[in-house]
Amino acid sequence: MPFHKHTVYELELYISGDINLITDKSTYHMQNGYLTLVPPGVWHRTTTVDTSIPYERIVLNIKPSIIDSISTAQTDLAQCFFKDGPTNIQVLKLDNAQMTRYIKFCHQLIPIINSNEFGADIRRRNLLAEIMLITNDAARSKQASLTNIIPPLIKRITAYVDANIANDLTLAAFSKHFFLNSSYISRYFKSYMGLSLHAYIIEKRIELAKSLLSQGNSVSDTCSLCGFGNYSNFIRTFNRHVGVSPGHYVQK
């Protein structure tokens, strides 16, 4: 699976398999009963370590508006996603009872996700509320005990990107900073992350650009602060990745 992010909340329950969960800052080995909570906009991927072991999981992608609709003033069902901040993935450990109930509710939910039968909307709402209640209960008491096994070079590269997002991030700059061959850096990063270093940098710069524009920065200032340098290239790249020009993004 390539490095990617969502505009929705993602819940991923690991049932079996020899799997690593990878973010831009950490790598964790998944176990039976681990429940991963991915907020919108957070980069992640999974890789199979031993392909001879069957990989089984249940994934739910939920629009923020749906979580809002089943929450109340007293019970915010989205809070479990942000226990450690809006840019971190949570990994919970469900006990046997929680896991049994979680799987049961998912199996009841999946067949009626697109149903127009009478009462299906209420059943979907109730089942999703039960799933999110289990998740929030686990978030308060069942944080998984994890060891970060991310390769040191990957961690250093992503940290360097974050610290120098407005500066020169060509392969030559990485080679000079890390005293490593640029081709080696490029191949190593892509083999681990599932996308090229160049693509990763562009995505990071687009994320920053969206944030700066939302804060009221001008298009030209945003272009400079994000390290694009060339104004026309910034407009084309932003349009290709976001679907609208920076100016229209501000208006929307």
Image (cartoon, rainbow, N blue to C red):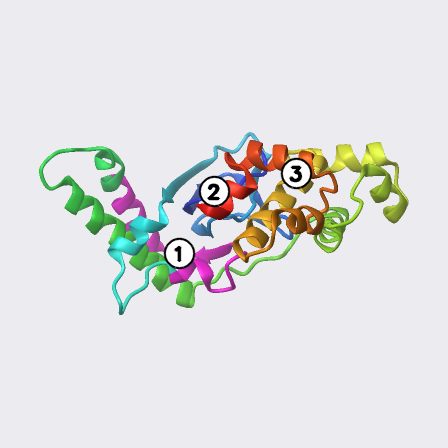
Residue 159 visible (yes or no): yes
Q: Which mark is residue 6?
A: 2
- Tell me: 195 left or right of 252: right
Q: Residue at x 72, y 51 (%)?
A: 155
Labels 3 & 1 near each other (Cβ < 8 A): no
Q: Position of residue 42 (x, y in %)?
A: 53, 49
Residue 150 place in picture, x, y as percent: 68, 49
Q: Amino acid at mark 1?
A: Leu
Q: Which residues are magenta?
A: 79-107
Q: Nearer the viewer, residue 41 or 208?
A: 208
- Nearer the N terminus, badge 2 or badge 3? 2
* Rendered view: 163 above or below 227: below
Q: Are marks 2 and 3 in contact (CB under 8 Å)?
A: no
Label 3 CA crowd tier, 10 Å (few <14, some 14–19, many 20+): many
Number of the label disc, if any, that sits on residue 234: 3
**Image quarter of residue 130:** bottom left
Mark 3 element type: helix
Q: Earlier in the sequence, mark 2 or mark 1?
A: 2
